[in-house]
Amino acid sequence: MRENLEEREVYNQIFELDTALWEELERLSPDDVCCRALVSFDKSNGFVVPFLNKECLCDIHQRKILLSEGGENPVPFQVALIVLTYLVRAREIPLTNQMVTEREVKGGSFFFRGPHALFTDPVLERFHDRPQPFLDAGIALGGVPRDFGDASFEIRALPRVPVGYILYQGDEEFEPRIVVTFDSSIEHHLPLDVIWALVNVISVELIKVDK
């Protein structure tokens, strides 16, 4: 599991944000961004974006994204990519309240394979026989319990992006598994590669908060 975690976290070290994303955000009206993404804007600090159980500050003047209570250190690459892409792409549409798997998202059945399979195996390894700690970890990230599988929760990862995690412990017929679900509107807010990054971040955080 340790190697898998390090493998996913290495993306935070070897990539930089595309400057085109910053340029696109700078061209947008802050009022429009706030309305579409359900975030707030401060002229001094930039956009304030709820993310999991924290808030990120997106400083468009210095082109950096920080945790509101995390000092001056920028957030990891994948978090920055998620937040910045969301600010640029989010649309002012309501939730459908129809939760779907990654393969039901448009294009997902082809994309989420091989190296782009969702990062759930280490979460399953950690929690397969521990439904209550699994639920506790989700709640620690701001999730709320749901009534699916043997344990489940839904996290509002971003204001318009709920993400569900469901644990099935398995039995004589079926292997244990983790299923990740999204409101079907997610395809209007995040592209597939950023959905993949979002699950990377959430899964790593679930393991980290489990004491």
Image (cartoon, rainbow, N blue to C red):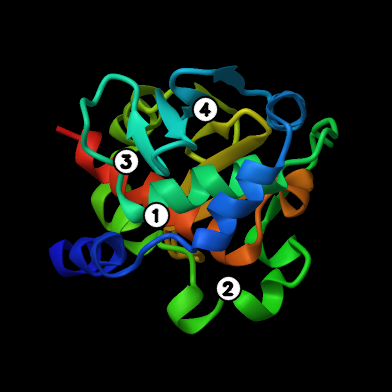
Residue 130 lies in quadrant: top left
Element assignment for label 1 = helix
Element assignment for label 3 = helix
Q: Are marks 4 and 2 in contact (CB under 8 Å)?
A: no
Q: Amino acid at mark 4?
A: Val
Disc 3 versus disc 4: nearer the observer: 4
Residue 106 lies in quadrant: bottom right
Q: CA distance from mark 4 to mark 2?
A: 27 Å
Disc 1 versus disc 3: nearer the observer: 1
**To which residue does mark 4 refer?**
49
Residue closer to the observer: 99 or 56: 56
Q: Amino acid at mark 3?
A: Leu
Element assignment for label 4 = strand
Q: Residues within 10 Å of mark 4 (few under 14, many from 20)?
A: many
Residue 51 location in percent, x, y?
47, 31
Q: CA distance from mark 1 to mark 2?
A: 17 Å
Q: Amino acid at mark 2?
A: Phe
Q: Of the residues under marks 3 and 2, which one precedes in the sequence?
A: 2
**To which residue does mark 3 refer?**
206
Disc 1 versus disc 2: nearer the observer: 1
Q: CA distance from mark 1 to mark 4?
A: 15 Å
Residue 112: numbered disc: 2
Element assignment for label 2 = loop
